[in-house]
Image (cartoon, rainbow, N blue to C red):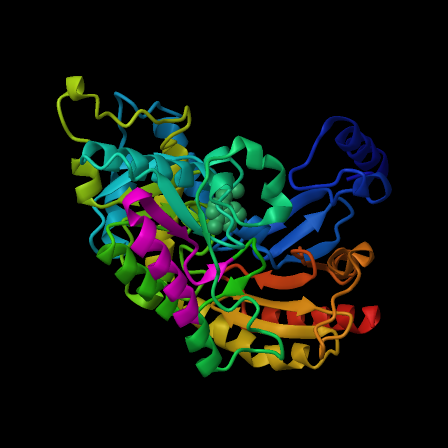
Amino acid sequence: MDQATKRELLDKDRQRVWHPFTQMKDYARQDHLLIEKAEGIFLYDADGNRYYDTVSSWWVNVHGHGHPRIKQAIIRQLEETDHIMFSGFTHRPGIELADKLLAIAPPGLGKTFYSDNGSTAVEVALKMSFQYWRHVGRPSKTKFAYLANSYHGDTLGAVSVGGVDLFHATFRPLLFDGYRLPSPLVGEWSGGRPTPEAAETSVAKALEAVKQLFETSAGEIAGLIVEPMIQAAGGMLMHPAAYIAGLRELCSRYDVHLIADEVAVGFGRTGTMFACEHAHVTPDLLCLSKGLTAGMMPLAATLCTDAIYEAFYDDYETQKTFFHGHSFTGNPLACAVALESLRIFEEEGVLDNVRAASDALRGHLPGLETFRHVANMRHLGLVAAFDLYADAASQTPYPPSERRGYQVYLEALKEGLILRPLGDTIYYWLPHCTTVAQLEDIVSRTSSVLERLG
Ligand code: PLP
């Protein structure tokens, strides 16, 4: 792109666009990166500079950008239909995808309800759970339990069960009340990676808090929502599978729906197709989006058990209809893409590559841990994260005004890396197609950034 066109676009961007999760004043001095091309694990800016997309374009990309089979799937579907409303009508990709999702999801889920982004997948789960208890004669079960540091999206229901105060506190007056539970392991990390014993104690403590809550209040709790294995936006906080297994057991014992929000971790990111598989657990409601379409189209799905579905299934006059839907619910192009992505998973050994890349990644992390500002290295599947401290040994944070994470972001761009920190937490959230050689290069470039920042 010529420089005049680039300048004109970026000026218009400043004048006309308000970007998400962005303090726009930061971009009064620093242009947004104008991306012109995306291919494989790389993004290319308007000057032809190449960047590793180590955050999978906000945790969505799976097979790399521009996968030819995905492109073809969109074209093929467009030749049949474009968007078709999904109430009163149905279509082949929507039907086939629902069938496929239920076949690969943890066993025991019976129905697929579509929407169009991760937040709406969560809204659907919350509303289904709430309405279910009314239909089965337990209308006092109206509240939700959620974890400190949880993130489930930005619509008001999802924010109500959100535990990241930086994002959510402003909106409290608009939200419904719930029960905030401690998340396991947080506060147990000082001194570095938790030992297996420390992790076990931490999980036991966190589960005890759930049990105590359920003992006193399960009669008014509809569901407990959790991001299995990795609390992502809350700081890439990872917990052992035993925590999810424990939640399943307690939710079953006390008649509370377990809502697994796998919007971020679903579709192979943690090394298994669904993160619940690490704990051999089936939730009552499973929220999916992001990687569902390999990150190519907006689509979401909330999977539920037959027991939940059947509580809504009655004559219209009984007023048990689930009155929820979106204009773009079950968009056929997105469903066709999701189906093609799942075929790629099966035919191109995608999960094998995830495991190989994950093993290679694990091998490189000790090198990053040698930097004196780095602490709390954690890793699962294609996700790895560490925290930056002014003094890692004593876990003394940088003063907030230093905005260390943001400095890392800016320096990483110079190294051809897109790192998008969460505060002072730096992480990788890599596409499934990442090769071992690319991993090595990414880690080496990250080391250069850390070295330069001192
Ligand atoms: N749930 C989780 C666990 C997420 O990480 C996100 C987004 O990052 C969402 C829900 C919301 O998804 P969306 O941004 O598509 O609304």
> Is 427 left, or right, of 5 in this rendering?
left
* Residue 250 point in image, percent of width and height: 28, 60
Residue displayed at 56% across by 53% down: 233
> Is 120 left, or right, of 22 in this rendering?
left
Q: Is 389 contained in the magenta span?
A: no
* Residue 396 point in image, percent of width and height: 74, 70
Question: Splitting the image into 4 quarters, where does residue 12 fall?
Answer: top right
The residue most toward the left is 315
Is residue 305 visible to us here? yes
Residue displayed at 53% across by 52% down: 59
Residue displayed at 32% across by 52% down: 216
Above or below for 79 versus 389: above
Q: Which residues are magenta?
A: 203-231
The residue most toward the top is 317
Question: Splitting the image into 4 quarters, where does residue 254 fall?
Answer: bottom left
Q: Quadrant of the N terminus?
A: top right
Depth check, front residue: 103 or 227: 227
Above or below for 81 versus 342: above
> Is 73 left, or right, of 307 in this rendering?
right
Q: Is 211 contained in the magenta span?
A: yes
Residue displayed at 78% across by 70% down: 390
* Residue 132 point in image, percent of width and height: 25, 36
> Is 33 left, or right, of 39 in this rendering?
right
